[in-house]
Image (tube, rainbow, N blue to C red):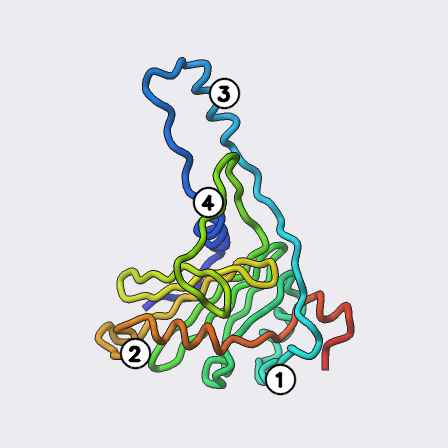
């Protein structure tokens, strides 16, 4: 079972944005290799956020959040999505930083975490990778690693990565990607600084 996740927002951007550049051939001159390596160094790009409409704000889910979590959601620089299931909103941990926000919650049956970031890494000459799956109507990557199902996609101009781990590795709910897809579809918007600035708070 995993604990509260630390800041790992760059993993999302790396998965959605690009792959590692190909190593230069062995016969490439040393000087050219050095210049190519320098050119391959990239700077994180801050994506433009598209804030959802006021009508999409889920006031019920926002009211269900504990005060500390709700306050963190209000300070988020990215649109905050959270699970709509009340058991996951009872005692979550929401952390908001300059470019990213994370959500974490645990119940008796599962641990759910969601990382939201507006940072991405773009490599010269390498186009973004497109996920082979679809989540919330967007191209997505869905993977499984040591019993943890992950889905990552871009929405609102922001990269989202949802991880789901069942309390028991043998739990039928985690035998396929059905649960992570279901939880992703149930995510609701509860705000951020963009919502606060436009007066969308209850």
Lower position in the chain sequence, tag 4 or tag 3: 4
Lower position in the chain sequence, tag 2 or tag 3: 3
Residue 164 figure quarter: bottom left
Q: For mark 3, what is the residue?
A: 35
- At mark 4, the secondary structure is loop
Residue at point 33% right, 70% down? 177
Lower position in the chain sequence, tag 2 or tag 1: 1
- At mark 3, the secondary structure is helix
Q: For mark 4, what is the residue?
A: 18
- At mark 1, the secondary structure is helix
Query: Which is closer to the viewer, label 1 or label 3?
Result: 3
CA distance separating discs 4 and 3: 21 Å
Q: For mark 1, what is the residue?
A: 63
CA distance separating discs 1 and 3: 54 Å
- At mark 2, the secondary structure is helix
Quadrant position of the N terminus in the picture: bottom left
Would you say the residues marked 4 and 1 are in contact, meaning their CB atoms lie under 8 Å apart? no
Q: For mark 2, what is the residue?
A: 173
CA distance separating discs 2 and 1: 28 Å
Q: Position of residue 9 (x, y in %)?
A: 50, 55
Query: Which is closer to the viewer, label 2 or label 4?
Result: 4
From the viewer's perspective, is 98 left or right of 180?
right
Residue at point 38% right, 64% down? 150
User: Total label count?
Assistant: 4
């Amino acid at each position: 079972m995993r604990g509260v996740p630390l800041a790992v927002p760059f993993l999302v951007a790396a998965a959605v944005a690009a792959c590692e550049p190909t190593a230069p051939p062995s016969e490439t001159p040393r000087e050219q290799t050095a210049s190519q390596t320098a050119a391959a160094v990239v700077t994180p790009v801050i994506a433009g956020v598209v804030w959802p409409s006021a009508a999409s704000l889920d006031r019920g889910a926002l009211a269900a959040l504990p005060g500390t979590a709700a306050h963190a959601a209000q300070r988020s620089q990215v649109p905050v999505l959270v699970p709509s299931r009340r058991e996951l909103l009872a005692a979550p941990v929401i952390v908001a930083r300059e470019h990213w926000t994370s959500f974490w919650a645990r119940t008796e049956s599962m641990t759910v975490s969601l990382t939201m970031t507006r940072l991405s890494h773009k490599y010269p000459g390498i186009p973004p990778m497109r996920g082979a799956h679809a989540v919330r109507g967007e191209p997505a990557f869905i993977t499984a690693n040591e019993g943890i199902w992950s889905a990552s996609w871009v929405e609102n101009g922001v990269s989202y990565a949802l991880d789901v781990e069942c309390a028991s590795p043998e739990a039928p709910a985690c035998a396929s990607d059905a649960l992570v897809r279901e939880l992703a579809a149930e995510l609701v918007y509860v705000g951020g600084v963009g919502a606060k600035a436009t007066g969308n708070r209850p």
